[in-house]
Image: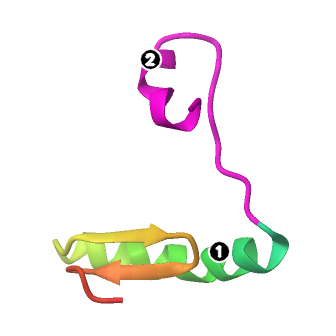
Amino acid sequence: MVRKRWKELDGTAYRVFEQFPTEVTMKRRQLVPKTKEARRLVKRAYLAYDTLYIDGIP
């Protein structure tokens, strides 16, 4: 319930972060530079759990 309403905390002293297992965190760290590069090339890129999606393709 809290994660769904995180926008209501905007402008307050509180933050909501996702917590992942160590294996997922390590995989995401490797994918972040690729995500930034794709965005620099004006592509729609985002991380969902431990998968990088670029223009809707995993």
The x and y percentages for residue 44 are: 22, 70
Q: Residue furthest front?
A: 1
Question: In what element is the residue under mark 2?
Answer: helix
Q: In this view, does 55 lie to the left or right of 16?
A: left
Residue type marked 1: Arg
| Residue 1, above or below 28 | above
Residue type marked 2: Glu
Question: In what element is the residue under mark 1?
Answer: helix
The color scheme shown is: rainbow
The x and y percentages for residue 56 are: 23, 80
> Which residue shows up at 61% across the image and 75% down it?
28
Q: Name the residue under label 1.
A: 29
Q: Mark 2 points at which residue?
A: 8
Prevalent SS, magenta region: loop
Closer to the eye: label 2 or 1: 2
| Residue 11, above or below 30 | above
Q: Is residue 2 magenta?
A: yes
The label on residue 13 is: none
Which span of residues is magenta-colored? 1-20
> Which residue shows up at 59% across the image and 30% down it?
2
> Which residue shows up at 36% across the image and 89% down it?
58
Residue 12, quarter of picture:
top right
Q: Do the residues labelled 2 and 1 touch (CB within 8 Å)?
A: no
Q: Which residue lies furthest to the right in this view?
A: 22
Rounded to the nearest angstrom, the CA distance separating label 2 from label 1 is 28 Å
Picture quarter with the N terminus: top right
The x and y percentages for residue 32 are: 52, 73
Of callouts 2 and 1, which one flags the residue occurring earlier in the amino acid sequence? 2
> Which residue shows up at 51% across the image and 17% down it?
9
